[in-house]
Image (cartoon, rainbow, N blue to C red):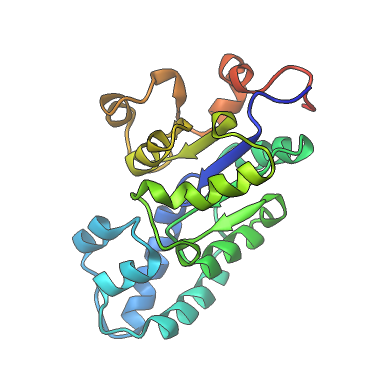
């Protein structure tokens, strides 16, 4: 039997991995190595922007290519933290041949590095980082190449779920007519999702909660798929 959902789009930061909690201290430490101090308010305002623009906003005098190498090397010394339920979800999708695309404003090099370190890269159909599109979140056109790719393998956007932790993710999904699940592992609260139109039954504390909530799971995946 074909599943109701035939493809998944996932945000990366704080949806798949706990990047703000784990990576921000490394980012701050790397900036310090260049003799600069991070303005935390400025960092918070710009968090979620394409990584290159984030660095330019908080440390404009630092050479980006040099910084990227230094930051990448520091990341390797600190194992990435995979959020609850992600491995189980990816394994389930992989067993049932449901492709997973990751869309992120992060650097392809850094996101791919984390996915490989976390042994998740083998599950990813395609990674769409900021280098891969001229449009970036919150511009809804960021999903256009992803949707074209899915269409080429006969997946309609009506059969796609988008998992994200922010209102930006929700608005991008909504603008493209894609079902959205709000995951509360980032900085967006349940009330914020509700106030902006996300249905409460589509909001979960973690991806793991989505998996163990039978009614929500069965709404999108038909019985009979490999458990």
**Residue 99 occupies which quadrant of the picture?**
top right
x, y (%) of residue 46? 27, 59
Q: Residue at x 60, y 41 (%)?
A: 86
Q: Nearer the viewer, residue 134 or 166?
A: 134
Depicted 145 relative to depicted 177: above or below: below
Along the horizontal axis of the image, is 118 left or right of 53?
right
Furthest residue to the top? Answer: 215
x, y (%) of residue 23? 43, 61
Along the horizontal axis of the image, is 170 left or right of 95?
left
Depicted 215 relative to depicted 87: above or below: above
Q: Residue at x 45, y 35 (%)?
A: 183
Q: Residue at x 76, y 39 (%)?
A: 97
Depicted 209 relative to depicted 52: above or below: above
Q: From where the camera sits, is residue 35 visible?
A: yes
Quarter of the image that includes the N terminus: top right
Q: How many marks?
A: 0
Quarter of the image that includes the C terminus: top right
x, y (%) of residue 121? 67, 56
x, y (%) of residue 178? 48, 33
Q: Residue at x 67, y 41 (%)?
A: 90
Q: Nearer the viewer, residue 26 or 174?
A: 174
Along the horizontal axis of the image, is 74 left or right of 21?
right
Q: From where the camera sits, is residue 83 visible?
A: no
């Amino acid at each position: 039997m074909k599943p109701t959902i035939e493809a998944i789009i996932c945000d990366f930061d704080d949806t798949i991995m706990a990047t703000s909690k784990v990576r921000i201290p490394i980012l701050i430490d790397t900036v310090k190595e260049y003799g600069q101090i991070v303005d935390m308010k400025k960092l918070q305002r710009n968090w979620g922007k394409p990584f290159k623009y984030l660095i330019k906003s908080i440390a404009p005098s630092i050479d980006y290519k040099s910084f990227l190498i230094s930051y990448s090397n520091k990341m390797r010394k600190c194992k990435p933290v995979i959020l609850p339920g992600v491995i189980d979800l990816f394994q389930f999708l992989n067993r049932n041949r449901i492709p997973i695309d990751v869309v992120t404003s992060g650097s392809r090099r850094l996101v791919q590095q984390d996915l490989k370190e976390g042994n998740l890269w083998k599950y990813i159909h395609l990674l769409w980082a900021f280098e891969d599109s001229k449009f970036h979140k919150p511009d809804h056109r960021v999903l256009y190449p992803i949707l074209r790719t899915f269409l080429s393998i006969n997946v309609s956007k009506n059969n796609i779920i988008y998992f994200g932790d922010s209102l930006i993710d929700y608005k991008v999904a909504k603008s493209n007519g894609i079902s959205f699940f709000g995951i509360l592992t980032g900085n967006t609260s349940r009330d914020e999702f509700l106030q902006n139109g996300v249905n409460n039954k589509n909001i979960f504390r973690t991806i793991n909660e989505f998996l163990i909530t039978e009614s929500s799971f069965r709404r999108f995946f038909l019985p009979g798929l490999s458990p």
